[in-house]
Structures are given as C-alpha cells and as structure tokens.
C-alpha cells in the first residue's frame, strides 16, 4: 500500500500554508500496516494462551465475522482507504500550489492506478498462470486502493468539500437502495444473505476470472462504490487539516464528523447490517467515523502536543507501506524467524512457539523497513 498522489481544487476554505508531511498520518498508517503485516496475527495467536480474559477478548477482535457483525480486524482496510484520501488532499494541494496542472496530475494518478491494479493481481495470484485467465482473481486490495484514489483525485480536482460529502453520502444511499430494491433472480429483492445478495449475483455474472468466495468476491465490482466513499471522506479530513482553523478547531470538527459517522452507521445497521463482505453503507459510515476519531487523536497527541518519539516505531512502517504489504506476501519472514530464533523459543511451552515465531518474523520485517528508513529509501508509485 502507499501514499496517495496529488491534485487540488478550489476549496471553500483555503489553507494559509502547506502543512507538509504530518507525523500523525505516517504513525497511524504505520499502526494500520502493523496489523496487516503480522501484528494482528500475533495478537490473535495470544488467544487462549495467557489465561487472561482481557487478552482473550482482544484476540477475538482479530478475526473477521463470518457474515454480519464487526470486529476491529474489519477496520484495518477501511482505515487505509480513508488515510489514502487524507494523503491525497495534501499531495494534490501541494502539487497544484507548485504549478502542476490538472492534466499532468490526472495522468500520474491514472498510471499509478494501473500499476496498483497489476501489482494487486500479481499479489492475489502468485504464482500466476497467465495462460489460464479464467482462474485469475482480478479483485485485489491494491487494485481497490488504486481505483479509489484515482476516482477521488478526479473528484478533488473538480468538486468542493461539501459537494464531495454529498457525493459520498449519495453513493451510500444509492448502494443501499440497489441492494434492497433490485430483485435477484431466484431470491427476490432485499435479500442480504450470503447466497442471495445482489453483490454476489452481479459478481457471478459480470466479474471475469475467479471469485474469492466462489459465489461472490468482496473486492470485485459493486463493493468498489461504497469503498470509494471511505477515500472521499478521508479527503474531507485532509481538507480540515489543511484549513486555516486552529488545531483545536480542526480536532473538534474531525471528532464531530467521527461521532456523526459512528452514530449513522449504528442506526443504519438496523435496516442494513454492518457487513464487511458487502461493504454495506452502515459499515462504511461506522468505519469512516472511527477513522475520523483515530486521526484526530493521533493528530492531537503527535502534531499538536508534540509527543512524537513514541510514534517512531510506527512511522518507520507507515513511510514504506507498499514495501511492507508486498514483502510479507513474497518473503517468508516466518521461515527466517524459525531459522534464527527457534533455538531460543523451543524451550518455551509448545503452544507458545507460534507466538514467538510470529513475533520474530515481524521483528525482521521492521528491521528491513528501518534499514530503508535510515537510508531514506521510500518506495512509492
């Protein structure tokens, strides 16, 4: 994963200066990537081993629900999409302020999208049989990020903050109405079950290649629309941070947006269940609200209060998010951990071996990222 590219538009409230790179955004992105790259697995593996009920409860939050419902693990990818929108606001505003034109920026973001789609297909299918396209999975995390940032970049260049808010909310309402009102052959309208939902029917009939869940793919076609809304809302957070308001006012506005998002998501859940597989509108509102709150908290602690040292560990990860995402896919750090550390942890009780091995694997990942950080190597697309 990575940072978003650049573009800007006339905003309702122009910044008086460029804020540059915010440490809080890198730190929050780093925490998010930590959960993807081994931290979440480590916490999950602690379940049932310590005898401490609190740790068991936290561990249970790092597995996705089978269908409806929500755990913290469901928040990881939405948070990244949200932060991609926030970064987009900064990079696009900065690029335009330096004289870049919209056509240039459009071409740059479009090329970036194509590269991410390609990397995403490679990630989901390696080793990929290019001679059997029917069994290639085309939906991917990286592809979704690339498409979402391209669409939001186009919106950012041509619509104001309030207009983008209405576009995002309108998209979520239309998505809800589509899933509720459009009848699915053999199931009828409003069926939100695993077998009978509109998303699955659409994927089976129009998505080429292999579907992850066989009957549908949560990273395929229709779910792209609500996912884009997360990046739209992230761009609104970027606008708030770039505004001329005082830090306190910015935090108040983001917290208010967060509370409203969470409340709307929970209320909408009554008629449209929170569901990561469907990327339901209630799920988008809930996770957007949580992302606003998380970003405001990190911004307050790191950039406003100035407590930055503790966040260094996370910033090392967040500044090379694409590297860590692909590295843990194509490099077997757990095997390396076993070779290096098994001689030490083999004396621990057997159930703890996998925990210590996962921890060792992540230490190796972080050291690679730290090497890149010290040498000022930051891989972007």
Image: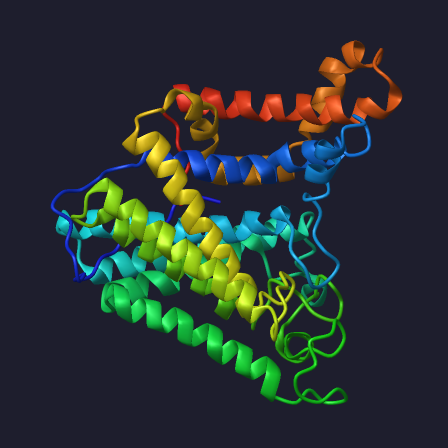
State the colouring used for the structure image.
Answer: rainbow
Point out the image quarter for the C terminus.
top left
Residue 361 pos. (x, y %): 66, 25
Above/below status of 214 relative to 197: above
Residue 53 pos. (x, y %): 76, 33
Above/below status of 65 relative to 87: below
At a point 31% along the width and 36% down the height, the residue shown is 22
Towards the viewer: 293 or 158: 293
Where, by quadrant of the figure, is residue 12 drawn?
bottom left
At a point 67% along the width and 80% down the height, the residue shown is 205
The answer to whether residue 149 shows anywhere in this view is: no
Towards the viewer: 104 or 277: 277
Which residue is the extreme one toward the right? 350
Residue 30 pos. (x, y %): 48, 35
At a point 23% along the width and 57% down the height, the residue shown is 104
Residue 27 pos. (x, y %): 42, 33
At a point 31% along the width and 45% down the height, the residue shown is 251
The answer to whether residue 379 shows anywhere in this view is: yes
For residue 249, side relative to residue 217 (left or right): left
Where, by quadrant of the figure, is residue 155 drawn?
bottom left
For residue 107, side relative to residue 368 (left or right): left
Q: How many marks?
A: 0
């Amino acid at each position: 994963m990575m940072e978003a590219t650049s573009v800007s538009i006339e905003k309702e409230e122009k910044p008086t200066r460029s804020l540059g790179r915010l440490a809080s955004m890198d730190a929050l992105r780093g925490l998010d990537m930590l959960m993807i790259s081994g931290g979440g697995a480590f916490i999950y593996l602690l379940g049932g081993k310590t005898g401490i009920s609190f740790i068991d409860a936290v561990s249970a939050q790092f597995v996705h629900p089978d269908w409806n419902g929500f755990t913290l693990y469901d928040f990881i990818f939405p948070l990244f999409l949200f932060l991609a929108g926030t970064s987009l606001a900064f990079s696009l505003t900065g690029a335009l302020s330096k004289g870049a034109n919209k056509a240039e920026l459009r071409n740059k973001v479009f090329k970036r999208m194509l590269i991410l789609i390609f990397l995403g297909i490679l990630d989901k299918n390696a080793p990929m049989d290019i001679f059997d396209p029917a069994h290639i999975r085309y939906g991917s995390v990286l592809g979704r990020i690339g498409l979402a940032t391209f669409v939001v970049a186009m919106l950012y260049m041509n619509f104001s903050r309030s207009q983008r808010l209405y576009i995002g909310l309108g998209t979520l309402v239309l998505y809800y109405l589509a899933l509720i009102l459009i009848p699915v052959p053999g199931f009828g309208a409003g069926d939100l079950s695993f077998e009978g939902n509109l998303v699955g029917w659409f994927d089976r009939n129009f998505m080429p290649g292999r579907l992850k869940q066989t009957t549908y793919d949560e990273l395929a076609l229709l779910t792209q629309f609500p996912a884009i809304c997360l990046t739209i809302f992230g761009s609104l957070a970027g606008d708030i941070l770039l505004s001329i308001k005082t830090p306190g006012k910015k935090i108040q506005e983001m917290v208010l947006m967060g509370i409203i998002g969470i409340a709307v998501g929970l209320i909408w859940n009554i008629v449209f269940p929170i569901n990561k597989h469907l990327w339901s509108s209630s799920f988008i509102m809930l996770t957007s609200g949580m992302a606003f709150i998380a970003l405001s908290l990190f911004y307050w602690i790191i950039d406003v209060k100035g407590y930055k040292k503790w966040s260094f560990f996370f910033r090392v990860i967040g500044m090379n998010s694409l590297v860590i995402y692909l590295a843990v896919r194509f490099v077997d750090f757990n095997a390396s951990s076993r070779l290096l550390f098994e001689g030490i942890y083999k004396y621990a009780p057997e159930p703890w071996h996998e925990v210590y091995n996962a921890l060792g694997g992540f230490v190796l990942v972080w050291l690679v990222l730290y090497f890149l950080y010290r040498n000022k190597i930051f891989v972007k697309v």
